[in-house]
Amino acid sequence: MMAHSPTAFSHDQFQMVMQKVANMELYYRAIQFYLDENPTQLVTMLNAIAAKVDHARVVQQVRKTGHLPLILPYLKHVQQHNIAAVNDAINDLYVDGEQYEDLRESIEGFDNFDQIALAQKLEKHELLEMRRIASLVYKKNKRYKQAMELARADGQYRDAMETAFASGNEDLAEGLLRNY
């Protein structure tokens, strides 16, 4: 079907055949085939073979082509497995799209990602809500001083106070009070 796609390809038949494939490499060739020939049906095909593929490898393959936003519905579907590559990809897409509510939900629900790298990326972001998420990530990683400094720099005094309380560190709390 892939070799003679203009005449032999049928999405429904292809999905049925893919359910019976034993060779793992064919799944990844099929992903490339869909990227090249039928990108609008890629998510449907990925969802059909989701139980049989390495999700991190799928992310890597699609990221190389620059079409990661195309598979966001699939990524959200498999995020339940809390795989670092999937979480990183979703979080990157949310940051690029400035979808701070979705990003906050993602990081609160799934913790397997490079948290410090994300926080460092977000602390310089132009949107206040993204910087607040950076502060939250620092706080979750017990980097209270960084979280408080970021919150204070943005005038988010409530966030800074909550971080000082969460730290349980009297020196941090007193330092916060001295600066007001």
Image: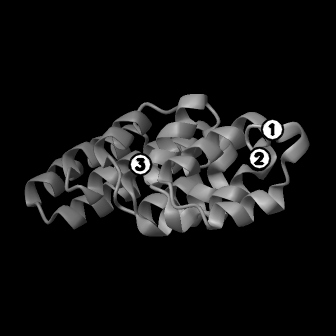
- Image spot of residue 68 (x, y percent): 61, 40
What is the quadrant of residue 93 in the picture?
A: top right
Of 92 and 2, nearer the camera is 2
| Label 2 packing within 10 angstroms: few (<14), some (14-19), many (20+) | few
124 versus 52 height, above or below = above
Q: Residue at x 64, y 46 (%)?
A: 30
- Disc number at residue 4? 1
Whole-percent x, y for residue 167 in the image: 18, 62
Q: Residues within 10 Å of mark 3 (few under 14, many from 20)?
A: many
Position of 128 with respect to 67 (left or right) is left
The chosen color scheme is: one colour
Q: Mark 1 and mark 2 in contact (Cβ < 8 Å)? A: yes
Q: Secondary structure at mark 3?
A: helix
Residue name at image x 73 percent, y 42 percent: 2
- Mark 3: which amino acid? Ala
Q: Is residue 170 left or right of residue 34?
A: left
Is 120 drawn above or below residue 134 in the view shown?
Answer: above
Question: Marks 3 and 2: CB-CB under 8 Å?
Answer: no
Which residue position holds label 3?
Answer: 85
What is the C-alpha distance between the residues marked 2 and 1? 5 Å
Identify the amino acid type marked 1. His
Dot label at residue 1:
2
Observer able to see residue 11: yes
Q: Against 88, is 162 above or below?
A: below
Is 129 in front, or is 72? 72
Please tell me how crowded label 1 is: few (under 14), some (14-19), or many (20+) other residues with Cα within 10 Å. Answer: few
Q: What residue type is disc 2 on?
A: Met
Q: Nearer the viewer, residue 12 or 3?
A: 3
Of pointers 3 and 2, the one earlier in the residue sequence: 2
Label 2's element? Answer: loop
